Image (cartoon, rainbow, N blue to C red):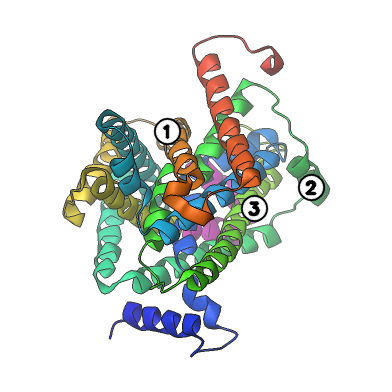
Amino acid sequence: MTSSERTRKSMADVLSGKHRSPFSRFLFVGPAVIASIAYMDPGNYATNIQAGAGYGYQLLWVVLMANLIAMLFQALSARLGIVTGKNLAELSRDQFPTPVVWGMWAVSEVAAMATDLAEFLGGAIGLSLLFDLPLIWGMAVTAIVTYGILIFERYGFRTMELIIGTMVAIIGLSYLVELLIAPVDWGSAARGLVTPVLPNGSALAIAVGIIGATVMPHAIFLHSGLTQNRVAIRHEDDRRRVLRYSNIEVVVALAVAGMVNMAMVIMAASAFNQGHSGVAEIETAYVLLTPLLGTAAASVFLVSLITSGISSSVVGTMAGQMIMQGFLHFRVPIWLRRLLTMLPAFGVVAMGYNATDALVMSQVVLSIALPVPMIALIIFTSRQDVMGPYANGRLVRLLSYVGAAAVLGLNFVLLVTTFGVTVPFLEG
């Protein structure tokens, strides 16, 4: 019996009352942990370093807002899978007109490539800095390691949950160490967390990048697939309990991811904002960390970056496979999926484009693509013919509309300013 089969049996025993233990809830932990790695990928490193270095603690409120939006939409995605037994891409294929389905798939594939660009480059940058390798060789090593981990997917969901969970723990502990080392101004950090401000147009671009790096399109698709057949549900009492466990897991997992993101901004603010505010690249941040905070801080930074790049690349490939299968009812070998999504990253490096700039721009692309799964998710989770008694209530609908409107509004302002239209409140 595999670990996944044992986990599924144990969950059934918990739901039936045969197994009672204070630790039994941990059996239901997994989907949100996997999804949470998308909120700690190398794209976050790039945007958070720029936010902290350039604006100190002022953009922490953006990280908090993005994390709260992420919690809501990941909880809705998990609910969709648990209630319907289908993932978001499958429901979109079944419910929307064919032209809409093709359009959604195309946008989602672009988002998947932008996601993999950030994740793949991040791991490669970390490996190239750690072992003094050319970036292209770091990418090759990242590709091999990522594919090696993906092979474990054949052993079932629990094995991947444990592997990704271990990597989440490494990233979280790394940034706990960084906060203990960095000279943090906690008063300024607290004010930045609750004081919404966008000093100028550059801050807006970074804010949209933070949104794109935090609320991830592929994670919204993926979470519904991770929950759709994980637990054998016999009746509605089982479903309600599974939903309750799922909501708790989402809050905890995304809270950890949010704290890691805040720690990235805080570390960059405390290390670079005074005297090195122009730091905008991961490589530069690593080089400066040694004289500013010591060798330990620089080493821990690299360990977390490599772990983030590899684990998020694994999760991105899983999501891409699920998106293609859901929309097109077509599955490609995992090695081919891995090859297709990493080609843009190799192209960026081959053309000599700045890696960190590519990371930041990939997050802007993700933020532009994000409304597609967000709007689809709101539509399905609000429909009683899809969700039955578990359809969104008025408050949840209102919050989801506000979250989607915030993302759409930021995207609109970014596009307007990108094309040279002046926005008065961003002048100066």
Point out residue 236 in the picture as x, y percentages from the top left corner.
49, 69
Please give the name of the residue rendered at 43% of the width and 39% of the height, measured from the top-left corner.
Answer: 376
Q: Which residues are magenta?
A: 279-304
Image quadrant assignment for residue 180: bottom right
- Mark sitting on residue 263: 3
The residue lying toward the viewer, choosing from 426 and 19, is: 19
Label 2 sits on what residue type?
Ala
Residue holding disc 1: 369
Q: Main secondary structure of the magenta part?
A: helix
Out of 365 and 127, give the one closest to the viewer: 365
Q: Quick one: label 1, few (<14), some, or many (20+) residues within 10 Å?
A: many
Compared to residue 408, the image places residue 83 above or below, namely: below
Please give the name of the residue rendered at 45% of the width and 32% of the height, measured from the top-left corner: 357
Instruction: Residue 280: say if magenta.
Output: yes
Q: CA distance from mark 1 to mark 3?
A: 26 Å
Percent position of residue 5, x then y: 32, 80
Residue 121 circle label: none
User: Disc 2 designates what residue?
Assistant: 190
* 184 is within the stretch colored magenta: no
Viewer-side residue, 419 vs 328:
328
Q: Along the horizontal axis of the image, is 89 left or right of 302?
A: left
Q: Quadrant of the C terminus?
A: top right
For marks 2 and 1 on the same chain, the one whose residue lies earlier in the sequence: 2
Q: Are marks 2 and 1 in contact (CB under 8 Å)?
A: no
Mark toward the viewer: 3 or 2: 2
